[in-house]
Image: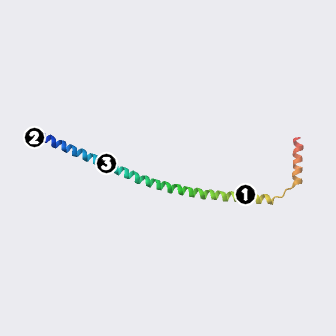
Amino acid sequence: MDNANTLDHLLKIEAEAAALVEDAQAEAERRIHEFEEKNRALFDELFRMEVEMREAFLKKEIEKAKIKYQQLLDDYKNEISRVSADEKHFASLFNEFLAVEG
């Protein structure tokens, strides 16, 4: 009977060890899951902040480009309005061109 008691005792210890391993695995999985959720939330927040920052920068750059384009267009319109059309001179140059080509 002594061997039977020893074997029962060893089986009981093995069952307790298996239960400890299962508990440890469950705890590890819980911690990993918690860590992943926390880091996913942090990543999402940082990503959102980065997107907002880049969108704001892009919006400013677009606004600068619009202002620059409008200024260039206004300058061009002003330059054109200051130039007087010399239709007689243009007609004579055009006629000379046609005469050379024809």
User: How far from the left and from the top, in percent, is residue 83?
Assistant: 81, 58
Q: Amino acid at mark 3?
A: Ala
User: How far from the left and from the top, in percent, is residue 17?
Assistant: 23, 45
CA–CA distance in space, label 2 to label 1 = 104 Å
For the residue labelled by badge 2, is the local secondary structure a helix, a strand or a loop?
A: helix
Q: Residue at x 34, y 51 (%)?
A: 31
Colour mode of the rendering: rainbow
In the image, is 5 to the left or to the right of 68? left
User: How far from the left and from the top, in percent, is residue 49?
Assistant: 50, 57
Q: Residues within 10 Å of mark 2 (few under 14, many from 20)?
A: few
Residue that protrudes farthest toward the left in the picture: 1
| Residue nearer the viewer, 78 or 99 | 78
Q: Residue at x 68, y 57 (%)?
A: 69
For the N terminus, the quadrant is top left
| Residue nearer the viewer, 40 or 59 | 40
Disc marking residue 2: 2
In the image, is 8 to the left or to the right of 34? left
Q: Which residue is mark 1?
A: 73
Q: Earlier in the sequence, mark 3 or mark 2?
A: 2
Q: Amino acid at mark 2?
A: Asp
In the image, is 55 to the left or to the right of 21? right
For the residue labelled by badge 1, is the local secondary structure a helix, a strand or a loop?
A: helix
